[in-house]
Amino acid sequence: MYEHDVLVIGGGLAGMRAAFTASQNGVDVAVVSKVYPVRSHSNAAQGGINAALTDRGDKWEDHGYDTVKGSDYLADQDAIEIMCREAGDEVISMEHMGVIFNRDEEGKLGVRSFGGQRQARTFFVADFTGQALLHVLHEQILKLGVRVYEEWFVLSLIMEDSECVGAVVMEMKSGDIHVIRAKAVIIAAGGLGRVFEPSTNALICTGDGMALAYQVGAPLMDMEMVQYHPTTLKSNGALLSEAARGEGAYLLNSEGDRFMEKYAPNMMELASRDVVSRSEQTEINEGRGVDGCVLLDVRHLGEKLINEKLGQIRQLGIDFADADMAHEPVPIRPGMHYQMGGIKTDVDGRTNVPGLYAAGETACVSVHGGNRLGANSLLDTLVFGRRSGQHATDYVKSKQYANIDDSAANGDKTRLQSILDRDSGTELFGAVRREHGETMNSHLAVYRDQTGMETAFEKLKELRIRNDKVIVHDKGKVFNTNLIFTLELSFMLDCAEAIILGALERKESRGAHTRTDMPDRDDENWLKHILISRTNDGETAVDYLPVKITQWEPQIRSY
Ligand SMILES: Cc1cc2nc3c(=O)[nH]c(=O)nc-3n(C[C@H](O)[C@H](O)[C@H](O)COP(=O)(O)OP(=O)(O)OC[C@H]3O[C@@H](n4cnc5c(N)ncnc54)[C@H](O)[C@@H]3O)c2cc1C
């Protein structure tokens, strides 16, 4: 058995920011990650990170208002105030740690425009901001001597007297299963993109963290709020960053019109993501699309700017859509991108389970509500990663280790062996995973309705039965990815359950949750969070929480 004061599950930006803070505060902290930390999905973040810096006349209150409006008034405003107030210091401290942000003509930190914001406040490193932040934080935690269990896969959380006291983890290299005892556990295991197919997310984004928390009774909040990004490639769902529209790209329909004029005359292509995705889908549904897509046109920006600031996405277009954006428009469409919901936490990362914290995309503070603004997620990971690391440090100082031993892993050992022992049948994880993802994409995408969501729920029940019969052909212990993928599939099914239940529950349209059968926002009845949890007897429960409103009363939302 291993032990650490604080165990962080996840080596992405949220996890490493939490670990950095806890380690700096002098507690023994370890990070466990199923991939080498710099391969975490934060690496894929392209466009940038938001902060309102006063030296350019920006105000955190303006950033706060844009975020509240972007969320369609579902986000908690106390959490937004904290995030926006602390954003400037967070960006500057990342710069001091070594992130080389792009500069403007005067040599100051450069900014670009992002959707749903009235001011350019997105700081960036070309179109690989996440990678730059991630590598610097990785260096920093190594410098502090944080223990990193890399390529270790968390199987379950350990509970004792209703408190979280550690995790059961598989070392993928050997297949050995270990207990890691901890006084506090911070889940920073990222998003669940691959619950949908296709998705802009990496194959590793399977919602493990949300499912782990759900399985020990922590509520998941705002799960019905799934963001479809307006600019993804048809061929494989890869993202072309909002940075393109931030730099001035046009969206065109088959008639060559900049159709956003109709839907968001003030903000045009830079309206918030839910608005742009709905507009695109409407154009496509009404016959003004191009082969199921609309067109992203950057030609007028010139090849020099495209190469300097959008080089990576130009290459993505060439590689996966056979279209060079410097010379022709690229076909794009809305695609699953981000989960606004997650494990319900307070502003210090605390969940409803003592000893259990969550931060980053896996968590729901909630600063994104019904729709996240581009470049607010990296900010969320850093601000609330740091705050979780800080609070967990204070929490463990007065805690003793729980009285557990290696036998805490027995349940998982038996479970895994029973999966490996299945030797008849033909069900493979890949087929179940694909059908599952495609079902979610068919019925819980940009537009939804009761019948579609009920169909998805019925399909989910069938897929659960099939999941219990999945055959793992590799019976070995060393890097048994066949087994890992099968375990991830179970996590994904739990996440899907919470998404569909939340979506069926919300009887209105708000943010990313747009119902064709209930098209209006209904503040009177639905200005509240929906929480889905699993009870001790394995049933699901639905609960509500009021939205915290501090200074921005809900208004009609237009861009
Ligand atoms: C293509 C793309 C571009 C984006 N661009 C931007 C942008 O420009 N600006 C912005 O603000 N946001 C952007 N986002 C969103 C943002 O990148 C993510 O929301 C954010 O990086 C998530 O960080 P995280 O630390 O929460 O999780 P991640 O970086 O996904 O890290 C999750 C960690 O958890 C570990 N883990 C998961 N499950 C287990 C398990 N069972 N056992 C052990 N370890 C586990 C993983 O190994 C990983 O280390 C983008 C997203 C995508 C998909």
Image (cartoon, grey):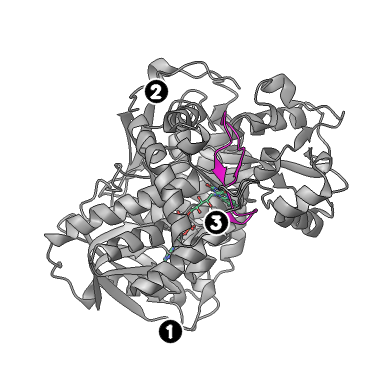
- Quadrant in which the N terminus appears: bottom left
- Quadrant in which the C terminus appears: top right
Mark positioned earlier in the residue sequence (2 or 1) = 1
**In the image: residue 68, left or right of residue 384:** right
Residue 349 screen position, x and y as percent: 30, 48
- Residue beneath the point at 86% across and 30% down: 256
Mark positioned earlier in the residue sequence (3 or 2) = 3
Discs 2, 1 touching: Cβ within 8 Å = no
Q: Overall secondary structure of the magenta stretch?
A: loop
Q: Residues within 10 Å of mark 2 (few under 14, many from 20)?
A: many
Q: Residues within 10 Å of mark 3 (few under 14, many from 20)?
A: many
Which residue position holds label 2? 527
In front of the other: label 2 or label 1?
2
Of 546 and 69, the residue lying toward us: 69
**In the image: residue 169, left or right of residue 323:** left
Which residue position holds label 3? 130
- Amino acid on which the number 1 mark rests in the picture: Ser
In front of the other: label 1 or label 3?
3
Which secondary structure, mark 3? helix
The answer, for residue 368, to whether it is visible in the render is yes
Which residue position holds label 1? 174
- Amino acid on which the number 3 mark rests in the picture: Gly
Any atom of ligand 1 within 8 Å of the CB at mark 3? yes
